[in-house]
Amino acid sequence: MQALFIGQTYIDVTMITDVMPTGDAKDVAKDYAVSFGGNAVTAAFACAKLGHAPDLLTSLADDWLGRMFLDMAARYRIPVHPRKVNRSSLSFILPKDGKRAILRARDDDYLHPFPQLNLGACKALHLDGHQSDAALHYARMCRERGILTSLDGGGLRSNTHELLAFIDVAVVAERLCEQMNLSAEGMLDYLKSRGCRIGGVTEGERGMLWYDEKGVVSRLPALPVPREKVVDTSGAGDVFHGTYLASYLARPQASWRDHFEWARAGSAFKVQHIGNEAGLPARADLDATMAALA
């Protein structure tokens, strides 16, 4: 096991359209994509595309969407450790003008306890807050063993405060700042107070405000993707997380600025493609994106 990612599986249906039909109206989308979804799940696929297939502890239903997901994971050689639910979770995503509307149906009523895994030679753990019991258990275990722990803080959850005490790298969204009534700077102070060695707040096209290994706060600008090339921003943050973890696995001695510069190229690549799978960058895509936009 190179790394362990823990999250909630979705199947994402993304449709490009200029209008949203209401009532009895009908319309035809310009394009669509069907892909895997979920924050940590998409990050795991991004990491795998870059050559470091992590183990994935995630929700799984015995239905046709669940079997579709297993086919997707097998294609990327991702070992799946399922936590059974009755029904698969589904997202409908409608990107438009650099934003995206999302409608979700989720089953997170887990039918069994989380599996006990042998971490072996695991080098990193990535969480998105789903499966709070499993997240806390493995974060604590990894901290005891000196394994890097990473959190995608997309929103406030019941155990966020407790979980952060075991997180080395916490990159959170503006939404979490809003939920906690904190500015971006205030959030960084909060992450420092919880003991996170690296902390950041992603702010879309403005990039990321973050602090490094020495606690120095700076801004990492986003790569300037031309507006006409922005197709689908959904999943850009997940690709960001998966890419910096792949960078860490490949170059554990590199600085976190180096890891995040790779990651922002991953996000810039993603927003130019519809759906999560089409937006996963290979190493050559990262190099080309950095060369084209830097």
Image (cartoon, rainbow, N blue to C red):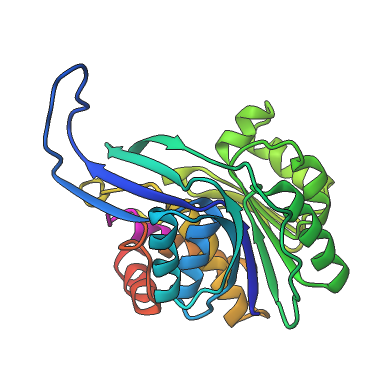
Image-quadrant location for residue 275: bottom left
Residue positioned most to the right = 144
The relative height of residue 66 versus residue 15 in the rendered view (above or below) is below
Which residue is depicted at the point 45% across and 69% down? 73
Image-quadrant location for residue 279: bottom left
User: Where the N terminus falls, by quadrant?
Assistant: bottom right
Coordinates of residue 160 in the picture (x, y in percent): 74, 42
Q: Is residue 238 left or right of residue 229?
A: right
Which residue is depicted at the point 68% across and 66% down? 125
Q: Is residue 249 left or right of residue 166?
A: left
Q: Nearer the viewer, residue 123 or 87?
A: 87
Q: Does any portion of residue 221 appear in the rendered image?
A: no
Q: What residue span does the magenta drawing correspond to? A: 267-275
Q: Nearer the viewer, residue 261 or 294?
A: 261
Coordinates of residue 188 in the picture (x, y in percent): 71, 44
The relative height of residue 77 versus residue 206 in the rendered view (above or below) is below
Coordinates of residue 262 in the picture (x, y in percent): 48, 69
Image-quadrant location for residue 294: bottom left
**For the image shown, how many numbered marks are present on the structure?**
0
- Is residue 268 a member of the stretch shown in magenta? yes
Q: Nearer the viewer, residue 222 or 76?
A: 76
Coordinates of residue 216 in the picture (x, y in percent): 71, 55
Residue positioned most to the top = 23
Q: Nearer the viewer, residue 291 or 232?
A: 232
Q: Does any portion of residue 44 appear in the rendered image?
A: yes
